[in-house]
Amino acid sequence: MGARIGVVTFPGSLDDRDALRAVGLAGAEPVSLWHADGDLHGVDAVILPGGFSYGDYLRAGAISRFSPVMDTLIGAAEGGLPVLGICNGFQILCESHLLPGAMIKNNHRTFICRDQVLSVENTSTAWTNAFTKGQRITVPLKNQDGQYVADERTLDELEAEGRVVFRYRDWNPNGSRRDIAGVTNAAGNVVGLMPHPEHATEPGFGPDTADGSRAGVDGLGFFTSVLTALIH
Amino acid sequence: MGTVIVDVMPKPEILDPQGKAVRAALPRLGLDGFTEVRQGKRFELTVDGEVTEEVLAQARQAAETLLSNPIIEDVVAITAVQECACGKGGCC
């Protein structure tokens, strides 16, 4: 029996289906989880997908944070369960205080959708062990509230502890402090980022690369990483 | 029927993109005297009875947990408004 990886659907989630498909492409069993169900159904890891849960009302992720599934997931994550938050999922993890900082509107005030170059700064997390340190990857980025902010002391701590997992390269698309695209908790089991690795996991549907149109599969490493982490 | 009003503002050190957009639009109306605009949120929490100390305590808890995110926002005021005989809150 292989690893079972859950993907939570909230009202307004958009990328849950792509995340489930990415899990399957990586060789694990995808399991749909529901926001109103506080039971994680014995999954080995959880992905909070992108979208606009609750219409981003109040603040992005603020209402989802108090859903029944999050009540259970917060304790499980503190106990070591691997959790990946993508885009809206990252916002929910920040609102839950599982990850430090918060997201505000992009500094240019417009929605952005592009293929984005990132560097992988920390390869010891549950979701990044398939990469090499400093490796550049290209995955889609699409958001309105993507500007990562935290106070200077928190940012200094994140830098000192190696908890900045991804940085935007070539161009900072939203004004995020110190080009931060993703961070981890101290234990390395909870990771959040604004770009979308699940949209770069299948040839023909990913970003353009030198190998061909839509050939990019740089995101697949996220989902194979957690399988490695679960074995060890 | 009483109401508790909670005012939330982005922290001073946080860039406020919405406020900046409003600030940039004002001169188009010929209103060019405003050097900065910051946009916050106002919540009106209504209860059936009076605004008691317990209601206020619950409003404070709501303000600090759900209504604001302490990393980017400050709760700048929590105000109780009691309805009175004239039908207008807090006037007499």
Image (cartoon, rainbow, N blue to C red):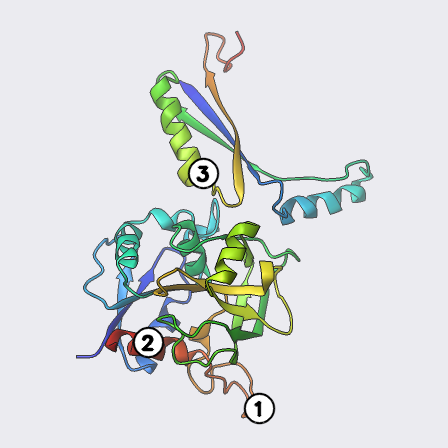
Q: Is residue B7 left or right of residue A12?
A: right
* Image x and y of residue A21, in percent: 34, 76
Query: Disc 3 marks which residue?
Result: B67
Residue depicted at x 80% and y 44%: B28
Q: Amino acid at mark 1?
A: Ala
Q: Amino acid at mark 2?
A: Val
Mark 2 belongs to which subunit? A
Residue depicted at x 54% and y 66%: A142
Mark on residue A23?
2
Secondary structure at badge 2 equals helix
Mark 3 belongs to which subunit? B
Q: Is residue A170 left or right of residue A184?
A: right
Q: Amino acid at mark 3?
A: Leu
Can you see residue A24?
A: yes
Which residue is more in the foreground, B35 or A184?
Answer: A184
Query: Disc 1 marks which residue?
Result: A210
Alpha-carbon distance for marks 3 and 2? 35 Å
Q: Height in image: B70 above or below A141? A: above
Of the numbered discs 2 and 1, the one sitting upstream in the chain is 2
Q: Is residue A169 left or right of residue A185?
A: right
Marks 1 and 3 share the same chain: no
Residue B47, picture quadrant: top left
Which residue is more in the foreground, A178 or A27?
Answer: A178
Q: Height in image: B80 above or below A49? A: above
Q: Alpha-carbon neighbours of circle 2 within 10 Å: few (<14), some, or many (≥20)?
A: many
